[in-house]
Amino acid sequence: MTEPIISIRGVSKRFGGVTAIDNISLDIEAGEIFALLGPSGCGKSTLLRMLAGFEHPSDGSVLLDGKDLTRLPPNRRPINMVFQSYAVFPHMTVAKNVAYGLEMERTKRSEIRTRVAQALEQVQLEGLGDRRPDQLSGGQRQRVAVARALIKRPRVLLLDEPLSALDAKLRDAMRLELVKLQEMSGVTFIIVTHDQYEAMALADRIAVLENGCLRQVDTPRSLYNNPVDAFVADFIGNVHTFDVSKIDLVEGRMRVHADILGPLMIDKPIPEGLLPGVQTGRGRVLTIRPESIGIKTGETYVPGHLTVSGTMGDIAFQGQHSVVEIRINNSRSISAIVDDATARELDGLGHETTVHAHWAVADMHLLESSIN
Amino acid sequence: MPGVHVAQKIEADTVRFGLLRRVRYEPFNYSRRWSLRTLFLIATVFLYAPIVVLVIFSFNDSRRGGNVIWKGFTTKYYSKAFQNDELMLAFANSLTIALVTMVLAVILGTLTAVLLWRFRFPFKPLVEGLVSLPIVIPEICMGVSLALFFSSMGWMKTGNLMWPLNLVNITIAHITFCFPFAAMVIRARLDSFNRETEEAARDLGASEWRVLKDILIPHMRPGIIAAALLAFTLSLDDFVITFFTSGPNTVTFPVKIYSMVRFSVTPEINAASTVLILMTLILTWLALRYQRALER
Ligand SMILES: Nc1ncnc2c1ncn2[C@@H]1O[C@H](COP(=O)(O)OP(=O)(O)O)[C@@H](O)[C@H]1O
Ligand SMILES: [Mg+2]
C-alpha cells in the first residue's frame, strides 16, 4: 500500500452553529480522480476549500505526502483549484491569466512564455492568448481556469463543480477532456459534484457525503453494487425502497416482512445485533433497482423471483431503453427499465392492463434507511 | 344591407381621421409620445440654454455681461480675464485645492470603501451612516460647523501663511465633504467583485499585497476614476463651504466670481466661466477615454 497523497484526519468544520463537515477521515491516492459527491449543501465545497486552504478545520488535520498543512495559507500549498465561477481575471488577457501563477513564482520570462504556450495547447486554446476573457465562451473560460491551475504543476488539482455551468453537449466533451488531461499530467484530481452520473463517469473513487458526514468511499461499481445504506443506493443510480416492518430469524435465515411484498426469505449477511426471534424492522428497507426489474404479461413462475402485479402506466422512451411505470395501487408505483423490443410490445397493451413486475430476490438489498 | 354599409363607412372614416387610432405604446417607448418629447425638449432647453448663452456672450463686445444685445464678436474679455491677477490667483487656488482634494479624497474613499465592503466589525451600520452623513447634511451647516471648528482650533490664521499652505483649511473642508461621495462610488463598484478571483490569485501564489495590486485595484479602477472626477468637480465649484472657511487672502474661483458679480456683471465673468466649463469637459472626456481604453 503506497502512502496516500492526501490524508484527511478527523476533520470537522463549524460555521457558528452550523456543522458543515462532521468528523471526516479520508485518504486520497496519488494519480487518481477522486470525486466528492453529495446533494447541494452537504459540505463538499467546504471540504474542498479546506484542502485549498481557504477555510481552516475546526478540528482535525490535513496531510499532504505525510506532512501537516492544516495551517498553511493557500499561496504556500502545492495544490491548485479550478473555481466554480472559473474566476478568470477579467482585466487580463488569456495568456496573462495563465502566466499569473508562474509570475508569482518569479519564473524566468522565457520559461513562462514556453510553458504558457504549452499549457494553452494542452487545453486547445492555441492562438487565443491575446483574447480578453469577455471574448470567450463559458467552455473556453473554464479551459483557461484549468490551464492556469495546471501550469503550476500542482500535486493535487481541485475542481469545484467543473461541469455544472456548461450545457449538456459541452459537458460530455469536457468530461472526456478532463479525464485526458488527468492522464497526460498525472496530477491527482479531486472533483466536487452533485451529479451522480458525472461522478461515476469521471472518478476512480467516489466519496458520498450527506449532511457533512461521510457515508461511503469506494469505486463507482462497488458503490452501485454494495451501497451501505439507502441514501447511497438512491444517490448512486435509483432504487425503489420497501419499508421493512418486521424481521425474524427462521432456522438461521432471515424472514423479512416488507410493506407490499409480504414475508420473504433473504439470504444476506445478517445485520449485527439481530437476535433470533421476532425483530422490529424499523429503520430498515429492502431495495431494488429499476434496471433489475422485468415485466411479463402472464403469471408464469420464475424460480427465485418474486412477482408484484399492477396495471400499466406511462412509458417514457429514452432511446436504447424505455422506462415503464407500473401502478401497484393508488399510492404506489414502480418503474422498470426495459429494452426497446419489450417496450414496443408493452406499448400495444394500453393503460390499465394488468402486468406483472418480477425480480430476483437475490438482487434486493436489506439496507438501513437514510433517516438516521 | 344598408346598415352594415353605413357602419363600415363610419369605421373607415374614423380610422382615416385618426379617431380610432388608439395605439398603445410600450412603457419605455417614451420617444414616440409627442407629450414626452416636448417635455424632454423643454427640460433640455432649460438645462443647456443658459450655458450656451453664457458661452456666446463671453464673446460679446459689450461692457456689461448682463446685456443681451449682441454688439459684435471679440475675445478681449478672455485676455482681460487672464490679465486679472486676482482672478488668476483665485483660479490657481481652486485648481490646487481641487487637485489635492481629489487625491486625498480618493485615497480615503478607497480605504473606507474596502473597509465597509470587506470587514465585519461592531457598529458597522453606524459607521456606514456616519460616512454618508456629509452627503445629506445641508452644506450651510457643514460650512458653519467647519468655520466654528477652525476658529476654535485657532486655525483661521493659517490664511496668512505662505501659498499654498494658506489653503489648508479650505482643502481639509473639501476633503471632508468630497470623500463620502468617493467612498460611495467605489463601494458600489465593489459589489460586482467576484470574490473567487481574489481567492484564485491567492491560490496561484499571490500574497495579500499582490492580490490588492493585481486583482482588487484593477477591478476598482473605473470606480476610482469616477470618484476622482466627482471629487475634482465638486471641489472646483464649491461655494458655500468654501465661503465659510476662506479668509480674505484665500479666495477661490467661485468665491471670486461671486464678489465680481456683486460689483458688476462683465463679460469677463462669462469668459472665466467658459474656461472653467471647457476644463471640466476636457477632464471628463479624458477620463472616459481612459476608461474605454481599459475596457478594450
Ligand atoms: N462561510 C460560511 N459561513 C457560514 N456557513 C457556511 C459558509 N460556507 C458554507 N456554509 C454552510 O455550510 C454548509 C455546506 O456548504 P457547502 O460546502 O457550500 O455545500 P455544497 O458545496 O456541498 O453545496 C451549508 O449549510 C452552508 O450554508
Ligand atoms: Mg458547492
Image (cartoon, grey):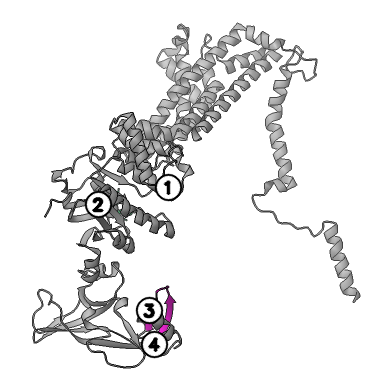
Amino acid type, mark 3: Asp
Determine the CA span between mark 3 and mark 2. 41 Å
Does mark 2 have its CB less than 8 Å from ligand 1? yes
Which numbered tag is attached to residue A311? Answer: 4
**Is residue A286 rendered magenta in the image?**
no
- Dot 1 and dot 4 residues touching (CB under 8 Å): no
Which of the chains bears the disc numbered 3?
Answer: A
Which of B110 and B293 lies nearest the eye of the viewer?
A: B293
Determine the CA span between mark 4 and mark 3. 19 Å
Neighbour tally class for label 4: few under 14, some 14-19, many 20 plus, Cα within 10 Å:
some
Which numbered tag is attached to residue A339? Answer: 3
Q: Which region shows up in magenta?
A: A312-326
Which of the chains bears the disc numbered 4?
Answer: A
Picture quarter with the N terminus of chain B: bottom right
Counting residues from the start of the chain, the first of labels 4 and 2 encountered is: 2
Determine the CA span between mark 4 and mark 2. 47 Å
Neighbour tally class for label 3: few under 14, some 14-19, many 20 plus, Cα within 10 Å:
some
